[in-house]
Image (cartoon, rainbow, N blue to C red):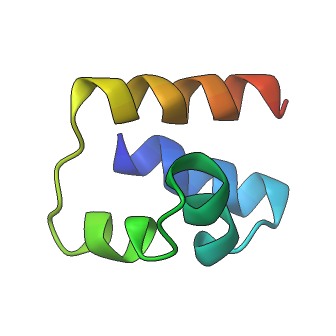
Amino acid sequence: MLWKVERFLKSSGMSPTAFGRQVARDPRLVHDMRRGREVGTRLMQRIESFIGSSR
């Protein structure tokens, strides 16, 4: 999942903090994922939906 988020951030120019806030109301989401945080099924679905709707 992290590689999808990283690819989206690069292509959209969105900051990791803004992405985390919009997807999960958690500005540290991407930072924590980079440090090994695993996301649950519901959050994974929200991330996929957000990325899909932003393209």
- Looking at the image, the residue that sits furthest to the front is 25
Asked whether, in this view, residue 27 is left or right of residue 54, the answer is left
Task: Give percent across and percent down for residue 55.
Answer: 85, 30
Task: Give percent across and percent down for residue 8.
Answer: 66, 48
Task: Give percent across and percent down for residue 49.
Answer: 61, 23
Whether residue 52 is situated above or below residue 4 in the rendered picture: above
Whether residue 24 is situated above or below residue 37 in the rendered picture: above
Q: Residue at (54%, 26%) from the top-left corner?
A: 48
Q: Residue at (14%, 65%) from the top-left corner?
A: 36
Residue situated in front as seen by the camera: 21 or 11: 21
| Quarter placement of the N terminus | top left
Asked whether, in this view, residue 53 is left or right of residue 26, the answer is right
Displayed quadrant of residue 25? bottom right
Asked whether, in this view, residue 44 is left or right of residue 8, the answer is left
Q: How many marks?
A: 0
Task: Give percent across and percent down for residue 33.
Answer: 29, 63
Displayed quadrant of residue 53? top right
Whether residue 22 is situated above or below residue 53 in the rendered picture: below
Q: Residue at (51%, 30%) from the top-left corner?
A: 46
